[in-house]
Image (cartoon, rainbow, N blue to C red):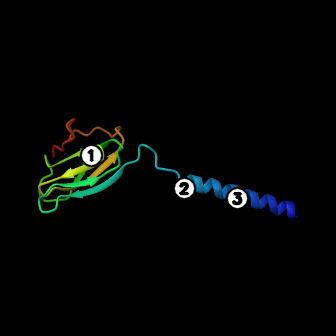
Amino acid sequence: MVAHISKIVTSLAIASISISSILGMAPPASAQQIITCESQNNRRTNCAIPPTGRVRLIRQLSDASCRGNWGYTRNRVFVRNGCRAQFAIGNSRFNRDRRYERNRRYNGY
């Protein structure tokens, strides 16, 4: 009986380790992160982002236009002139969208 209980405890420990390793895994490389960046008092604001690849403006939240008032570098998004928007940060395999040109600017169609 002690041997049987020992096998059960061992099985539960292995299952627990397996489940915790699955839950603790990092998101896949194709995962996106959504951030909100907003210009305060029409000043330029920098928002830190992970250096994961491309940035897309997905939703303008301000009344002020974001067209020509945002951009990004390797590890930050910037907005200015009252622009407030949500950005998707992810790998370089985003689906192509005609609103986003090669120069990384939102065309606002």
Tags 3 and 1 touching, CB below 8 Å: no
Precedes in sequence: disc 3 or disc 1? 3
Q: Position of residue 26 (x, y in %)?
A: 48, 50
The extreme right residue here reads 1
Where is residue 75 shown, x and y percent of the image?
A: 30, 47
Rounded to the nearest angstrom, the CA distance separating label 3 from label 1 is 44 Å
The answer to whether marks 1 and 2 mark residues whose Cβ atoms lie closer than 8 Å is: no
Q: Is residue 36 left or right of residue 31?
A: left
**Label 2, residues with CA under 10 Å away: few <14, some 14-19, many ≥20:** few
Separation of residues labelled 3 and 2 (CA atoms): 15 Å
Judged from the image, the secondary structure of the residue bearing numbered disc 1 is: strand
Per the image, label 3 sits on a secondary structure element best described as: helix
Q: Nearer the viewer, residue 37 or 74?
A: 74
SS assignment at label 2:
helix
Query: Mark 3 or mark 2, which has the lower sequence index?
Result: 3
In the rendered image, which quarter contains the N terminus? bottom right
Give the residue at mark 1.
Answer: 56
Q: Given the image, on which type of amino acid does mark 1 rest? A: Arg
Q: Which of the pair 98/54 is nearer the observer?
A: 54
